[in-house]
Amino acid sequence: MIALGSDHGGYELKQEIKQYLEDQKLEYKDFGSYNEEACDYPVYAKAVAHAVADGECEKGILICGTGIGISITANKVKGIRAALCSDCFSAEATRLHNDANILAMGGRVVGPGLAVKIVDTFLHTEFSGDERHMRRIRQIEEDI
């Protein structure tokens, strides 16, 4: 299951992503926001991040105006590797190399056509499992 979350700046793009997931018959859970009224992105970032970290959902997709704030917030949750991507190459690389479990995007940065391609790439690229990447992930997860 895919966890979805957005603030008001990402709401419209999230609707496009939901349609893509439905067309692909991929299950998702929408953690909000549920309209375009101004709201605070950390609420939705934390909800999605905890759902992924706790195993309720396999991966997550977060969208705010730029994708920056929502990804910073999600990365505060232990076990989350949220990657802000605005292109398919980055979405593929972050899955292959970082085993990212949350994709973040900017609703005011990425158009719907490209966003769907980024999501498709993110969801269908497996982690390489290479030792060098596994070592780096362990280093990321170590406390400073």
Image (spheres, rainbow, N blue to C red):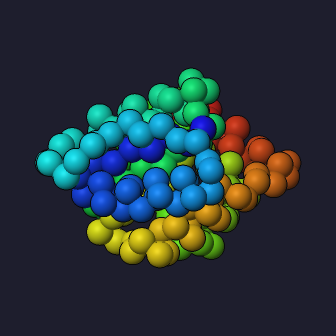
- Residue at x 14% of width, y 48% of height: 38
Is residue 108 placed above or below 56 in the rendered structure? Answer: below
Q: Nearer the viewer, residue 56 or 127?
A: 56
Q: Nearer the viewer, residue 138 or 79?
A: 79
Is residue 24 placed above or below 72 in the rendered structure? Answer: below
**Direction from residue 85 to residue 12 in the image, left or right:** left
Q: How many marks?
A: 0
Q: Quadrant of residue 142?
A: top right
* Place of residue 31 in the rendered image (x, y in percent of width and height, measured from the top left): 38, 36
Q: Is residue 143 in view?
A: no
**Direction from residue 87 to residue 26 in the image, left or right:** right
Query: Which quarter of the rendering shows the N terminus?
Result: top right
* Place of residue 69 in the rendered image (x, y in percent of width and height, measured from the top left): 32, 51
Q: Nearer the viewer, residue 127 or 30?
A: 30
Q: Is residue 42 in view?
A: yes
- Residue at x 30% of width, y 60% of height: 12
> Which residue is farthest top?
54
* Place of residue 22 in the rendered image (x, y in percent of width and height, measured from the top left): 54, 53
* Place of residue 91 in the rendered image (x, y in percent of width and height, measured from the top left): 60, 64
- Residue at x 42% of width, y 62% of height: 16
**Direction from residue 13 to residue 26 in the image, left or right:** right
Q: Quadrant of residue 111?
A: bottom left
- Residue at x 27% of width, y 43% of height: 34
